[in-house]
Image (tube, grey):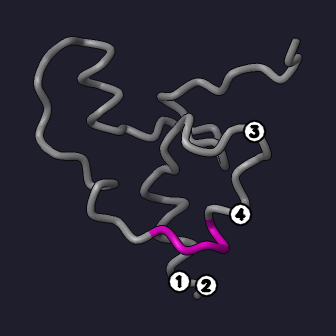
Amino acid sequence: MDATPRPDPSRCPLCGESNRCAMEIERETGQAQPACWCMEADFSEDLLARVPQGQSRMACICARCAAQAALQD
């Protein structure tokens, strides 16, 4: 059995703040949302590598963390 807690899909796996992902909001509320910004974002391999092991593709990285990473590239 895996003892690693499942991440909250509404929280950024890097900073823990709300990721405001439209897909997650739609899943939670059942109300259609416009396409999420993250669907068009280009996440660098370096940024994706910072996501804790076992949490990849379970929660969106927030816009702030994505923007900060883009400035560092």
Residue 21 image-quadrant placement: top left
Q: Relative to 42, is 3 on the left or the right?
A: right
47 and 62: which is toward the camera: 47
Q: Amino acid at mark 4?
A: Ala
Instruction: Give the label on residue 72, or none.
Output: 2
Q: Which residue is mark 4?
A: 49
Tell me which amino acid carries mark 3.
Answer: Gly
List the residue tagged with mark 3. 54
Which residue is depicted at the point 65% across and 27% down?
7
Q: Is residue 52 magenta?
A: no
Q: Nearer the viewer, mark 4 or mark 2?
A: 4
| Direction bottom: furthest residue | 73
| Spatial separation of the CA atoms under disc 1 and disc 2 | 4 Å
First reached walking from the N terminus: tag 1 or tag 3: 3
* Span of residues in magenta: 43-47
Secondary-structure class at tag 3: loop
Q: Residue at x 77, y 20 (%)?
A: 5
Do labels 2 and 3 touch, CB within 8 Å?
A: no
Magenta stretch containing residue 46, yes or no?
Answer: yes
Q: Quadrant of the C terminus?
A: bottom right
Crowd rating for badge 3 (residues with CA inside 10 Å; few <14, some 14–19, many 20+): few
Disc number lying in front (2 or 3):
3
Assess whether mark 2 and mark 1 are in contact (beta carbons under 8 angstroms): yes
Q: Look at mark 1 in the image and give the residue it sits on.
A: 71
Q: Is residue 52 above or below residue 66?
A: above
Q: Position of residue 12 (x, y in %)?
A: 56, 42
Q: Residue at x 29, y 33 (%)?
A: 23
Considering only order in the chain, which callout, 3 or 2, is on the residue closer to the N terminus?
Answer: 3
Mark nearer the N terminus (4 vs 1)? 4
Label 1, residues with CA under 10 Å away: few <14, some 14-19, many ≥20: few
Mark positioned earlier in the residue sequence (3 or 4): 4
